[in-house]
Amino acid sequence: MAGHSGLLIAGLDVGAKNVHAVLIRNGDVVARATVLSGFDHEESAARGLAELARIAAIPIEEVRTVAATGAGRNSLSSASHRPSEIAADGRGAVDLYPKARTVVDVGADVARVLRLDAAGRVVDFATNERCAAGAGAFVEAMSRALDMSLDEFALASLASTRSIAMNAQCTVFAESEVVSLIHANTPASDIAKAVHDAMAARVAALVRRVGVEDPVVLAGGVSLNAGFAKSLSEVLGGVDLYIPADAEFMGAQGAALLAWDAAGED
């Protein structure tokens, strides 16, 4: 336990689009930052750490422990802890919302669903790593097809009350469907809702695989998309989704807390 008090720990969630970074001291978050991922995960992680140090107004050398999760976790030589995305999500979810039982984490390139027991332990999980149409990159690609920003696309979806089925199972064919809808003079709001509904249907299939148990927490970068959140709730039969503040940092926060837990056991 020696040296545990005051220990600064950085948690990095290295994804395909962003590196989410969290700095904790004594188990409490003191800084959060997001930087773009690049081909060089070491360089991206270094930028994330530098941004944390800047926000916390501390020398970067004071960050003695780095915990990394996400697709690039094994690429970071600076990381002394490399928890899986499932472990990090479970720990982060319990910290952000202690009552969580079902956790839906949707990022740019992957969707994960976890079911937790009353003690916050992961009892089942499912991932959607092979289907881009079930992750955030799908919505971004479709918004570009409509020449809309992601925020505009999400807001447009909320304005639609019409359901249009999209049958494509991959982003390339779905984009062709979107182009066909545009040529048919389908309102942009209806196309946006169709895209969100299609993505929500794929994520909902993961949720049903592990079992829906309230409360259901939605996290990851796509949790910021109100259009997707509405579609997912509807596809799941109107279930209430709890979206914690800073939900996109759940994995990074969980990684840092797992390292903090381990330090307390030393």
Image (cartoon, rainbow, N blue to C red):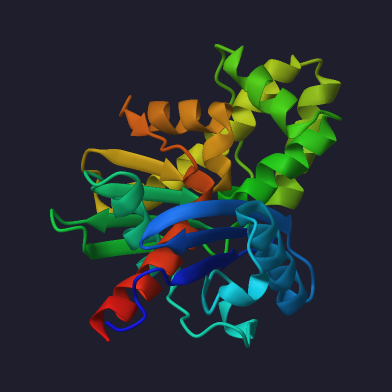
Quadrant of the drawing holding the C terminus = bottom left
- Name the residue rendered at 60%, 40% in the picture: 167
Residue 225 visible at all: yes
Query: 182 or 2: nearer the eye?
Result: 2
Q: Residue 240 placed where, x, y %? A: 32, 28
Q: In the picture shown, does residue 133 fall above or below 22?
A: above
- Name the residue rendered at 65%, 20% in the picture: 155
Residue 169 visible at all: no
Left or right: 181 in relation to 233: right
Quadrant housing residue 232 = top left
Query: 127 or 105: nearer the eye?
Result: 105
Quadrant housing residue 199 = top right
Q: In the picture shown, does residue 107 fall above or below 66?
A: above
- Name the residue rendered at 56%, 36% in the picture: 224
Q: Residue 246 placed where, x, y %? A: 50, 42
Query: 105 or 46: nearer the eye?
Result: 46
- Name the residue rendered at 72%, 72% in the picture: 46
Left or right: 227 in relation to 142: left
Q: In the picture shown, does residue 180 fall above or below 158?
A: below
Quadrant housing residue 165 = top right
